[in-house]
Amino acid sequence: MFYPSCLCESSAYQFTDRDHPHMSQTFGIHFSHFFVLNRLLDHLKSEVIFMEKLGDSIMNELETAEDEVCRAWDLYYNKTLDFCGSTPKTTKDRLEGSHDVSTLVFNTAVKGCADVWVEEMRYRMAVAFLSSVWEKCSSELSKLFLSMKDAECNRRTQIKELMSKAAQRQECLWLGLPSVVNPFLKELNEWPMERKLVEDDVQYSIRERAQSIQRDEAEHRRTGENPKSQAPELNGVYEVDGNFELSSPLVSDLMCKAKVIEKRSPGMMSSWKVSLAVITYDSFLQLFELPPTCKLHSGSAPEVAFQNLIPPVVVPSMEGVKGGVKFPSAKYWLDNLVPSESFALPNCVVSHKDEKNPSSFEIVETILTSGASKMFTKTLNRKMQFRAVTREEAKDFVDMLKRSK
């Protein structure tokens, strides 16, 4: 029977060898056993706290990734509705509002330009992130369950050894009670300690707890519907259908061309930076600035460049929780998937000047002013210079830009 350590200490000092030598020896044995039991209990508590912390972190990571998918879907769905709900004249103005140099002189700009590909790309990548998080979290949960089984096996083994030693020592003191000690030792020796039995016992406890949680969630759904199930156009999709995966955004029907190219702003102090340029069906040029550590250059494969925009998926793990790593990670995983620059091609003039640098070209975009700037002018011009590897590549990209207007 377990007693608090303070009770053990106080009891141990109530008797001396002079008064009751057998009682002193007995309490000395009990005190050493209680000390080991206390240490086992403290270790068990720390393990349980650690497992709860890791399990909560894994669940938070999965919920955050799922929320990101729902949010990305809502944005993509609403953007699609806005685009498809436009009148034919508005759609034509968006897709065919090309400009020439004379238009730029009058500083006009097409209103209502919108790019659906960006929202579709973020939705695709959010689904990919959720799929990767689910796989890695499943692996970490398997490790966690295995750790729980190992901990329980070790705990039972140590308790068995401790109680066996205690019984053997008490047998030396209580030789007059063999009828009590022998059945107890026999019962200890017959304890089932096979690893499979212990693992089945732990697995049964986990399954019982999971079923209890499922019952609570089912009761909660009966009292009030889950808001996640009310996502638009997802009424016919069931979670039991399995894990969903989408193809890369670079093979989307909303994208016309992707290319790794160099860009720089006008000015003496500006430098060339490698970027991933994407021309979309909605007449937009989207630029994603690549991190300097990726070691890519103009002309590299767009697929490799896009992968460098995505950081590795990190989920809660035993090592991470012990090391103090902060989770969830979905908040920063999609940060690099926001274009650093966006050009509405109907409002742009693209010029390719062969005489100075055959592999470079320039884009000038007319943008509408906002805020206090409206008092002085209605439009502003924004310039950006680009450089390809060869003249042919530059000309091909310029032709694609003009066709996409």
Image: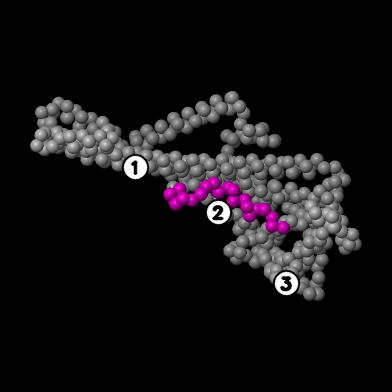
Badge 1 density bin: few <14, some 14–19, many ≥20, Cα 10 Å: some
Count numbered badges in the picture. 3
At label 2, the amino acid type is Pro
Q: Distance between the residues labelled 1 and 2?
A: 34 Å
Residue displayed at 30% across by 42% down: 39
Query: Mark 3: which amino acid?
Result: Met
Which of label 1 and label 2 is nearer to you?
1
Q: Does residue 102 appear to the left or right of 195 in the view shown?
A: right
Whether 339 is among the magenta residues is yes
User: Which one is in front in this view, the residue at disc 3 or the one at disc 2?
Assistant: 3
Nearer to us in this view, 6 or 185: 6
| The C terminus: image quadrant | bottom right
Name the residue: 11% across, 31% down: 175
User: Given the image, on which type of amino acid does mark 1 rest?
Assistant: His
Q: Which residues are the magenta region?
A: 319-341
Name the residue tied to disc 1: 43
Q: Could you say which disc has been placed on residue 320 in the image?
A: none
Q: Which of marks 1 and 3 is nearer the N terminus?
A: 1
Query: What is the CA distance from the residue labelled 1 to the residue labelled 3?
Result: 65 Å
At horizontal 81% and vertical 75% (from top left) the residue drawn is 355
Q: Position of residue 163 (x, y in %)?
A: 23, 36
The one of 285 and 34 positioned closer to us in this rendering: 34
Quarter holding the N terminus? top left
